């Protein structure tokens, strides 16, 4: 059966391992570059993207990961993992030398970190999620219970990126610069559209995407017992989705 690695330098590694194992696939914690070769797919967990960036670089994992991603390895990133998979971070945190955090990249999109702002630091909601049954449609599918914890949203996607889920959120950027990154909290999402006639202050924000073999969600299905997102990822690994 398939071997699914879980990047285990930081974050909610155990929850992903448990979810993958419960679906009958092999779940392998990954800390060393040499462990990448045996994998059929990889999960980058939720946690803190600045710490993950720092640790993957110091463990010598960042460049080997970029190479595997470029070579087509299926990768699923949740929350901080979504940030790691994005080509552009709108508001990267800066280290003490003023150098911005880096992502691994792979998905042609711009993400904003901690995007839902202080009022909604964390929240739970039910989401329509496209393609979970493999039919490519949301119709008739039970919604996904999604937990957002200081979550990013996707501000912009390139042509090859499929939008799988959106959530209604206040049309306000986070209050003030999140961590002083360039442009933090300043630019609005150009593609955001108002939801509902009387509520122009709420817009649709993209919270799940797929681009080829790469899948990313702003939220954490691994902590609610929701297994369909991981199931979709395993079908992607098998070439069935
Ligand atoms: N805010 C975190 C970051 O920037 C992500 C939070 C999460 O993964 N729950 O990495």
Image (cartoon, rainbow, N blue to C red):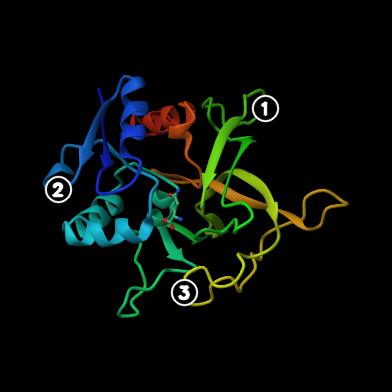
Whether pointer 2 and pointer 3 mark residues with C-beta atoms closer than 8 Å, the reply is no
Residue in the foreground of this view, choosing between 20 and 156:
20
Instruction: Answer with mark 2 or mark 3, whichever residue precedes in sequence.
Output: 2
Mark 2 to mark 3 CA distance (whole Å): 30 Å
In the picture, the disc for residue 32 is: 2
Q: Quick check: is the Cβ at mark 1 less than 8 Å away from ligand 1? A: no
Where in the figure is residue 51, as x and y percent of width and height?
A: 31, 58
In the picture, the disc for residue 181 is: 3
Give the foreground label among 2 and 3. Answer: 3
Where in the figure is residue 128, as x and y percent of width and height?
A: 63, 35
Q: Quick check: is the Cβ at mark 2 less than 8 Å away from ligand 1? A: no
Q: Residues within 10 Å of mark 1 (few under 14, many from 20)?
A: few
Instruction: Answer with mark 3 or mark 1, whichever residue precedes in sequence.
Output: 1
Q: Quadrant of the C terminus?
A: top left
Q: In this figure, which residue is indicated by the disc labeled 1?
A: 139
Q: Which residue is at 43% across, 68% downward?
A: 92
Secondary structure type for disc 1: loop
Q: Quick check: is the Cβ at mark 3 less than 8 Å away from ligand 1? A: no
Mark 3 to mark 1 CA distance (whole Å): 40 Å
35 relative to 225, above or below: below
Secondary structure type for disc 3: loop
Q: Residues within 10 Å of mark 3 (few under 14, many from 20)?
A: some
Left or right, 32 with reference to 129 = left
In the picture, the disc for residue 147 is: none
């Amino acid at each position: 059966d398939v071997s699914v690695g879980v990047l285990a330098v930081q974050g909610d590694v155990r929850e992903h391992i448990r979810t993958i194992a419960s679906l009958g696939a092999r779940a392998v914690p990954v800390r060393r570059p040499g462990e990448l070769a045996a994998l059929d797919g990889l999960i980058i967990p939720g946690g803190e993207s600045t710490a993950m960036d720092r640790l993957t670089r110091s463990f010598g994992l960042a460049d080997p990961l970029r190479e595997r991603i470029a070579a087509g390895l299926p990768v699923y990133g949740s929350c901080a993992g979504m940030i790691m998979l994005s080509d552009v971070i709108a508001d990267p945190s800066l280290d003490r030398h003023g150098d911005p955090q880096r992502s691994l990249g792979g998905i042609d999109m711009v993400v904003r970190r901690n995007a839902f702002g202080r009022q909604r630091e964390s929240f739970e909601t039910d989401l329509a999620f496209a393609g979970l049954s493999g039919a490519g449609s949301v119709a008739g599918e039970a919604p996904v219970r999604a937990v957002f914890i200081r979550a990013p949203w996707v501000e912009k996607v390139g042509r090859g990126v499929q939008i799988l889920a959106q959530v209604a959120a206040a049309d306000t950027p986070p209050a003030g610069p999140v961590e002083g990154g360039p442009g933090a909290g300043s630019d609005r999402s150009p593609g955001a559209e108002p939801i509902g006639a009387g509520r122009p202050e709420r817009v649709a924000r993209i919270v799940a995407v797929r681009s080829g073999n790469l899948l990313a969600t702003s939220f954490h299905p691994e902590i609610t017992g929701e297994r369909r997102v991981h199931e979709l990822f395993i079908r992607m690994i098998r070439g069935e989705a």
